[in-house]
Amino acid sequence: MTETLPPAALARIAEAVGVAERGTAGEIVVMVSDHAGLYRSTVMVGALVAALVLPWPLILLTGWSAASIALAQGLLVLAFLAATLDPGLRMRLVPRRVARARAREAAQRAFRQRGLSRTRGRTGVLIFLALAEHHAEIVADEGVLRAAGPDPWNGAIAGLLDALRRGETEAGLVAAVRAVGAILAEACPPVAGDVDELPNRVIVEE
């Protein structure tokens, strides 16, 4: 994480949040997580399914003995277990839909836990990036959804993921903050007496 987003990069993203919030009553929070889940149980289920399926082609297509097939089953399970020790290899075994669902759940949980649902005007917006899953979510509170509609963030998310694939995480997050700020400026313009309710710093979760 520190190599991906060093302190200077985090400071620049936080500065972009501050600039974006000057034009809106909305509150923007950026959170970057190394991973949304560990997926050990997912890999274990895959190992068990593979071990149950493996004997049938061996029985039908080979003359292997029961002992040889049992040994092959054991080796397959051990290979899956070894994969759980390497986070990168483990992620390759996780179905894409499972990774996306886990990232979505993590974003929703962070939105609640980090106080974004407790702003005065219900105008909090979370930009959540899960690095291992290569997935981004933008979660908005009900005040924003009423004014901006249910799903105005597609362009911001697509741009962020494109930047992540190019290895330009900082630039992608800054651009996403600016895009969200522009939407909020129209949907939730500044009001008299508005205060900055949430910190601008980037939340980093390892």
Image (tube, rainbow, N blue to C red):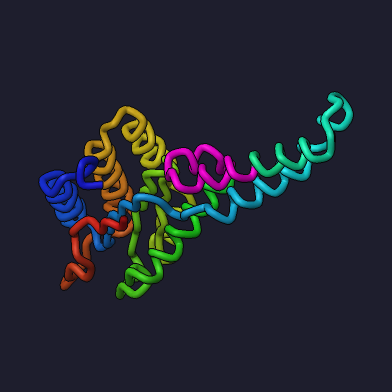
Residue 95, given in percent of the width and then of the height, sits at 59, 42
Q: Quadrant of the C terminus?
A: bottom left
Q: Which sits in the foreground, 141 or 136? A: 136
Q: Main secondary structure of the magenta part?
A: helix
Q: How many marks?
A: 0
Q: Residue 61's quadrant in the figure? A: top right
Q: Is residue 15 left or right of residue 130?
A: left
Q: Nearer the viewer, residue 161 or 54?
A: 54
Residue 44 image point, x, y percent: 61, 51
Give residue 59's position: percent from left, percent from top.
86, 32
Residue at 43% of width from left, 43% of height from top?
Answer: 86
Residue at 22%, 70% in the rendered image = 197
Residue 46's spot in the image, x, y percent? 65, 46
Nearest the camera: 95 or 164?
Answer: 95
> Is residue 63 shown above or below 52?
above
In the image, residue 163 above or below residue 2: above
Q: Would residue 113 appear left or right of 59 to someone viewing this image?
A: left
| Residue lying furthest right | 60
**Stretch in magenta:** 77-96
Is 142 contained in the magenta span?
A: no
Snapshot quadrant of residue 66: top right
Give the camera-side residue of 99 and 54. Answer: 54
**Residue 155 relative to residue 170: left or right:** right
